[in-house]
Amino acid sequence: MAVKNSKYTYRVTWSEEDGEYVGLCAEFPSLSWLARTPEAALKGIRRLVSKVVADMTKNKESIPDPIATKRYSGKFMVRVPPDVHRQLAIEAAEAGVSLNRLASAKLSH
């Protein structure tokens, strides 16, 4: 498996519907791998991603960059209804902090 493939964001969770563990990859949301153990689910999804990346490379398709290697500015815009904006502004003023600081604190919980 290429080093780049090992930097992808993998997760294993239980699927009650399937009665097995499911391996997932955030950068390839359409892929999954079912297995009886969490270890086998992780191994399976990693192998599948490796095969998909090899196929995409062969076909000269654009391959997603691993989330872990991307740089983030720390800024993003969130749209909320005006009444929510007003309530948050009041809450921030009462707490003596900026609206940005209040929103950041709420998002980090």
Image: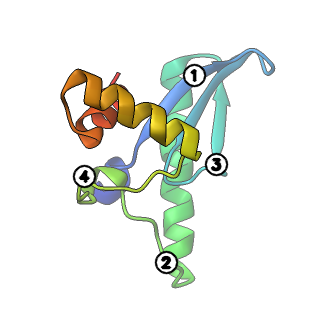
What SS does tag 1 mark?
strand
Label 2 to label 1, Cα distance in Å?
Answer: 28 Å
Label 4 to label 2, Cα distance in Å?
Answer: 26 Å
Residue located farthest toward the right when viewing the structure as drawn: 17
The residue positioned 56% from the left and 61% from the top of the image is 52
Residue 74 is labelled as: 4
Q: Nearer the viewer, mark 4 or mark 1?
A: 4
Q: Earlier in the sequence, mark 1 or mark 3?
A: 1
Label 1 to label 3, Cα distance in Å?
Answer: 14 Å
Q: Earlier in the sequence, mark 4 or mark 1?
A: 1
> What amino acid does circle 2 point to?
Ser
Q: Which residue is mark 1?
A: 13
Q: Nearer the viewer, mark 4 or mark 2?
A: 4
Asked if marks 4 and 1 touch (Cβ < 8 Å), the reply is: no
Q: Which residue is mark 2?
A: 62
Look at the picture and state if 16 lies above or below 78: above
The residue positioned 24% from the left and 22% from the top of the image is 95
Q: Earlier in the sequence, mark 4 or mark 3?
A: 3
Can residue 35 be seen in the rendering of this structure?
Answer: yes
> What amino acid does circle 4 point to?
Gly
Coordinates of residue 100 in the picture (x, y in percent): 27, 42
